[in-house]
Amino acid sequence: MELYSLFQQHPVICTDSRNCPEGSLFFALKGHNFNANVFAKTALENGCAYAVVDEAEYAVDERYILVKDVLSTLQQLARHHRRQLGAKILAITGTNGKTTTKELIAAVLKEKYNVLYTQGNLNNHIGVPLTLLQLKPVHQIAVIEMGANHPGEIKTLAEIACPDYGIITNMGKAHLEGFGSFEGVKNTKAELYDYIFEHGKAIFINKDNEHLMEMAAKAGFNEINRIREYSLDPENDVCYIYGKVTSCSPFLNMKCTIDCFNDFNVRTKLIGAYNAENVLAAVAIGEFFGVDIKKIKQALEKYVPQNNRSQLTVTAKNKLVVDAYNANPTSMKAAISNFGQMDVEHKVLILGDMFELGEQSDLEHQTVVELLKQYDFEKVILVGPRFKNTENSFLSYDNAELLLTDLTGKNEIKNCYVLIKGSRGIKLEKVLDAL
């Protein structure tokens, strides 16, 4: 492959003509509102060695590589590169918690191995290839996050990454607009199990989740050496990897057990009991790959969440539980329930609309409102037109800008624990400085 030979000489990929490391390869990707072929010349002027384009009019000299489709070429290059190296690939997907779980797994594995793992949210048909193309011979394991909002997308990503191992964090109602139904979500996520069964070695699974167990069985997993289970259910306390939440006010503490005899306590910096299954997944995977128990505990306790995911932020006015990176009905209900159970006073919620729910949107927002009514929170603030259209008596705002105006005026919040959660499109991070 001529292009792969060039990649070996120039192993840095660039997709933004404004950010071109010297000697990199520019891939002129297209989107609904842009055509990077137009910027190929600029990319070369800004430092790229070659530009990969798929429109002949832009391939004016030998520094342009003309292909049929740039995106497909990027994906094929990533797949080929992945197959040339010896790193084991662990793929991770799921409705909620996949990014936090990915980071916990990477933190644990880094105690023993040289690990590459997905940065930020580069988990789609472009992000996965870009991550794989960062693989170097020194990497022993790669943890690759895979996201999807339409059927078939996990299958495509698995065929690019060729994972040896897989984990689905959980199943929930998200991206219903693209999947059509909860069954559509399950079928798409199960594409990872299907790939691992046919081509890989083993999966890691939360034994408590009946959806995941059903999906694994349907894929064909029934051999004990190809499925590694973990559990938080007291009825499964003899499970090889078992965990129990010991406290969560506000940080999650838990007791973990390996093979019934090896117990250790973990004091995390994560907010929310719903993160217990994410922690336990990292324990299970770390143990499987031979990381020492003391190192597993050390890694989990050192990990500090970033990017508005399960973070506790202490300000001059309040203590903020920030989980504003994304939201869907499953994660929203879990966050509300956990916040309701926290043993703290003066609890305030600021919740933003949940996006991409299609025809289920009105029903799911009303269901969240009904859950809120079951708790005696000091104040509930709803942000966005979807929540504002529900039947409720809570404070409601059309957008974060209007809320911000009130938070700096008549509705200032002080000396409270504040849960902030919503879909990224609501931009609740705008109100953080006022809290």
Image (spheres, rainbow, N blue to C red):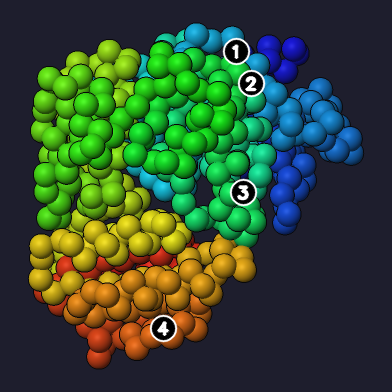
Q: Please give the name of the residue rendered at 18% of the width and 72% of the height, measured from the top-left corner.
A: 347
Lower sequence index among marks 4 and 3: 3
- Number of other residues with Cα within 10 Å of mark 4, as a class: few under 14, some 14 to 19, many 20 or more: some
- Disc 4 versus disc 3: distance between alpha carbons? 33 Å
- Disc 1 versus disc 4: distance between alpha carbons? 51 Å
In which quadrant is the C terminus drawn? Answer: bottom left
Return the mark for residue 428: none
Q: What element carries label 2?
A: helix
Q: Is residue 287 left or right of residue 352?
A: left
Identify the residue under disc 1.
Answer: 83
Identify the residue under disc 2.
Answer: 79
Q: Is residue 134 visible?
A: no
Identify the residue under disc 4.
Answer: 397
Q: Please give the name of the residue rendered at 21% of the width and 76% of the height, measured from the top-left corner.
A: 377
> Given the current orientation, which residue lies at the most extreme bottom position?
410
Q: CB of mark 2 within 8 Å of CB of mark 4?
A: no
Q: Where does the image place residue 388, in percent across and percent down from the top left?
A: 46, 83
| Residue type at numbered disc 3 | Gly
Lower sequence index among marks 3 and 2: 2
- Disc 2 versus disc 1: distance between alpha carbons? 6 Å
Q: In this view, does 391 lie to the left or right of 237?
A: right
Q: CB of mark 1 within 8 Å of CB of mark 3?
A: no
Q: Where does the image place residue 303, in percent across and percent down from the top left?
A: 23, 37
